[in-house]
Image: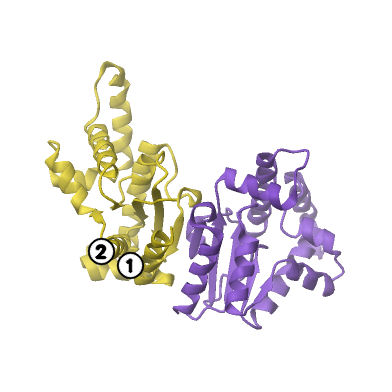
Chain colours: A yellow, B purple
Amino acid sequence: MNVKIITISREFGSGGHSIGKSVAKKLGWKYYDQELVNKISEESSFAKEFIETRGEYATTKSDLLYSLFENFGATTGSQSINDKLYITQVNIIKEIAQGEPCVIVGRCANFILRNRDDVLNVFIHADTDFKSKRIVELYGETKDDPEKRLKDKDGKRAVYYKYYTGEKWGIITNYDLSFNSGKIGIEKCSDIIVSTIKSK
Amino acid sequence: MNVKIITISREFGSGGHSIGKSVAKKLGWKYYDQELVNKISEESSFAKEFIETRGEYATTKSDLLYSLFENFGATTGSQSINDKLYITQVNIIKEIAQGEPCVIVGRCANFILRNRDDVLNVFIHADTDFKSKRIVELYGETKDDPEKRLKDKDGKRAVYYKYYTGEKWGIITNYDLSFNSGKIGIEKCSDIIVSTIKSK
């Protein structure tokens, strides 16, 4: 296995962003999280905020359901704006994967790059307590309690993933490595990924 | 986290036995796979062969369903033989966990020890091609093709696990670490587990 791309899928608050960034830094690889949003925005007509809120999440379940109804017109060439964004993301992620070695966080990258054999797919999860504490430290309090915020965000990620890939989000066999970051430790997760790449 | 028990759940043919054995050897910990069958047999009236075939697998789906019907008598103190074996296993696994540090393979150990905070739960899976090749090398050919053998054995493990734990087998969030052993390599999986324990 000659890995040149690492995809990181993550539960909200589990530290996937930090782990991905740390891995990319240690390996000297490119890192795409917010950087991917910037790139998609530069190469399309989508605003960054729209990409952030709609490029990985269903806004509501009915939102994508509406998109599904819109798509009855797909054979005539019409696409919902959600679908247009997804297709743009697919093309940009495939283009990035042709370039320098990189770490890509989220956005169904593990599914989009599933036919390549140089990809290591990682999933990061953690207990609710660990994630709750972390999102309050990182993003502050909101009117909703942390547990509700975790459930909402991951629920929308799961709906989005299912809608565009046809698969359930977070199936163990879809990932080469998975970690409970609360138990293993964020820095140790990053060290293990780096050591796995270097051992190849 | 002060880990003193590692549980290894594994798809058939994924190398979970070899990884567990290698980890135990490197850490100097006790190892329970066949050793657990021997211990259960010594401390109960069950024959080794019965424990091997019924202590982790439904023989058929209807087998455990039959056991379920038998249990309508449970309030009067009657138990199916499957349930008696399961309860014996639960007690012995809990007893083992009170002793020296150890690695336990299979037998719902992750579920049985879920209330302890000194357990690292690991899941090993791999692609069908990798597992098929491996079971033919290790156990030889049979009248069934390897793919059918994998599906049968893991299907029976999943039914057994669901029946006795109420949970689906192989849910990513039930494990602290999971590996695609075909991609990561059996020796590397073992090294990562050992290094995780040592880093704590």
Identify the subunit bearing mark 1.
Answer: A
Identify the subunit bearing mark 2.
Answer: A
**In this picture, residue B119 sits left or right of residue A156:** right
- Residue B88 lies in quadrant: bottom right
| Amino acid type for the residue under numbered disc 1 | Ser
Q: Position of residue A185 (x, y in %)?
A: 38, 72
Secondary element type, mark 2: helix
Quadrant holding the C terminus of chain A: bottom left
- Residue A54 lies in quadrant: top left
**In this picture, residue B157 sits left or right of residue A36:** right
On screen, A51 above or below B56? Answer: above
| Amino acid type for the residue under numbered disc 2 | Lys
- Marks 2 and 1 belong to one chain: yes
On screen, A55 above or below A189? Answer: above
- Which sits in the foreground, B82 or B8? B8
Residue located 38% across and 42% down the image:
A111
Q: Residue B112: in sight, yes or no?
A: no
Q: Position of residue B49 (x, y in %)?
A: 84, 59
Q: Position of residue B113 (x, y in %)?
A: 60, 71
Q: Which residue is mark 2?
A: A25
Of callouts 2 and 1, which one flags the residue occurring earlier in the amino acid sequence? 2
Disc 2 and disc 1: Cα gap in Å?
Answer: 26 Å
- Per the rendering, the mark at residue A168 is none
- Per the rendering, the mark at residue A132 is 1
Q: Residue A173: in sight, yes or no?
A: yes
- Which sits in the foreground, B87 or A56? A56
> Dot 1, crowdedness within 10 Å: few (<14), some or many (≥20)?
many
